[in-house]
Amino acid sequence: MRRLLRVNLSKGVVKDEDIPKKLALDYVGGRGFGSKYLYDEVAPGTDPLGKQNKLLVGTGLLAGTGAQSLSKWIVVTKSPLTNTFARSYGGGDFGAWLKWAGFELVIFEGKAAKPVYLHIAGGKYEIRDASAIWGKTTSQAQEYLKKQHGAKARMICIGPAAEKQVRFAGIFSGRRAAGRGGTGTVMASKNLKAVVIEADRKEELANPAEFKKLVQQQVKGYKGGLGFEPFRDYGTPMGVDYPGFAMGIFPVRNFRSADLEGWEKISFLQYAAITQKHSGCYACMLKCGKIRTVPDGPYAGVNSEGPHYETIWAFTGPTGCTNLEATVMADHMCCELGLDTISTGNSIGFAYELFEKGILTARDTDGLVLKYGDPEPMLKLIEKIGRREGLGDILAEGVKRAAEHIGKGSAEYAMHVKGLEMPGYEPRAMKALGMNYALSNMGANHCYGYAQQEMGNPRPRLVDAAADEGKGDIVKYNQDYVAAIELANACTFPANNLEFFGLELIGNMLVAALGETKFGSADYLWLVGEKVYNLERCFNIRDGFSRKDDTLPKRMYTEPLQGGMRDGEIIRKPDVIIDEYYEARGWDKNGIPTKATLKRLGLEEVDKDIAKFRR
């Protein structure tokens, strides 16, 4: 029997429930469960930071087994940044421990009267006092909890930024984070500091021999894959060199340029030179985490499990800074405070441009001079954001709300979609990826539908990154594929980059693990992925989202990109791509799924909620 744990923090009541068999078959697991329960239990108009919002923490069907790269954990909620559906993934070991504890999902509802944490051990669940760690950094909180519950315990927690209601705070396990969309902010709004699990390893499989064979096949495929060794050795910082600057997709100075003088100082080889050891998630031989320590200079001794590509970009591109040591420091600070690095760096880049244009002055920045190339103001702003001090208090709202507060035309320079800050890939240089930002259910999120076809992946076909049309079906394909693999909480790195890892293997593993033959069909997993994507869209539609919100910052349409391989590019025909996309999805011209589409996907009951939004 597949189970979930429901935690009512207002009443202090914890109970376990069976997941209905029909729901389990119809939504498979992982993101499917998160989307279904959120849609059913969070009503339109709910305040993301109010008691009625819910925080869903889940694991995958294959978590805690020998299956590679399938033990991530997911957080689903209504975002305080965007007021949309939000999902974010975290790595490390927590997903495996949650599975061993016997649950695929934990639903937090209500709000505790005082700071608490949930402790799960030996079939018992206890809501405990967290006053001793409220206000503590993520590492301080986790160190305290390990002393209380032992080194073998695994946990997730929030930092001071979430407690201060910074709208883009994340949830951390070790130094891995479910960072995007303000998941940690929602957790803090419930006075929930952490979840701690003590559990013994167990692997209950329908067909152990077949499962073992499939894992061996997977491991062999990893070792033989062309990208395996470089990715294991260097990790995601390889993206700085390629495709970053080689393809001109590394955004610089708040998405104006693709050139950064001295970028070689932040090449992946420079990060490799200070790497001390490799780390990874449970049962993943890729080990993309890299423990790095600054050897000398003003940040000597500072270390982080990274920075990964996105964090490198966040603290170099927006501020025009090429100080490698400062990026390690910035990553460390964000982990301690509990901040999403993408939104933090983007928000600081927004402030740098406003300072350059005179919209912000030293009076607004507490004397900080936001000069491109200087990392010191950037680091001070990270601290100010995490503590909500001075200008940081404004930036902590995210660039959309910050621009509304600042005024003076600053909205022109706020690089976001639906309120979620854009990550480190230039939309004008990769237009299918850029339009994925615009069309994503949660705003600008590259992982929601990464356009590999613009970088040489022939699945389902190659696409010219600069083309202005003929991409709507590709955007849909990528989004549905990601939704499908996330039914099992599969990591997108190997699933997108290694040709031997995909839905067919995941399906076969699900059958061997669960004995449910329905899950062995890649076509079925595709269909459920599409279904889940549409359900998330309907969640947003109930709150008034439609075509008007499927847009990029004006800069992407009117200001040519400066420098790089795509010099002079703009997105010329966004409406063409949107129309192609809506047609491929079976949505009307306003972006509302048709009745026929919902019926095809088995979402007939949802039609009553959104029929009134059709024109």
Image: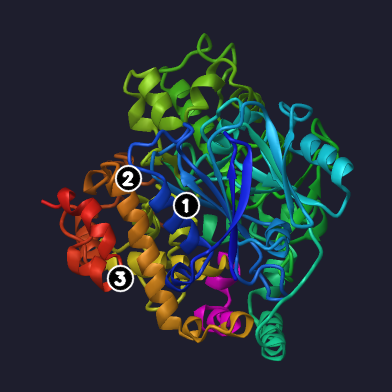
Q: Is residue 505 magenta?
A: yes
* The disc label shown at residue 601, or none: 3
In depth, the one of 331 and 570 nearer the eye is 331
Please, which residue is most extreme toward the left here? Answer: 615
> Which mark's residue is nearer the viewer, 3 or 1?
3
Give the residue type that dot 1 points to.
Tyr
Residue that badge 2 annotates: 552
Residue 368, by quadrant, is top right
In depth, the one of 283 and 510 nearer the eye is 510
The percent coordinates of residue 72 (x first, y second) are 63, 61
**Residue displayed at 60% across by 33% down:** 188
Contact check, label 2 and label 1, Cβ < 8 Å:
no
Count residues near mark 1 (Cα–Cα under 10 Å), then give few for <14, some for 14-19, many for 20+.
many
Q: Determine whether the residue tagged by mark 2 lies in a helix, strand or loop.
A: loop
> Which mark's residue is nearer the viewer, 2 or 1?
2
**Residue displayed at 49% across by 33% down:** 51
The percent coordinates of residue 564 (x first, y second) are 45, 53
Count residues near mark 3 (Cα–Cα under 10 Å), then give few for <14, some for 14-19, many for 20+.
some
Give the residue type that dot 2 points to.
Leu
> Which mark's residue is nearer the viewer, 3 or 2?
3
In the image, which residues are magenta? Answer: 491-510
Residue that badge 1 annotates: 425
Q: Is residue 452 visible?
A: no
- From this view, report whether residue 417 is shown above or below residue 167: below
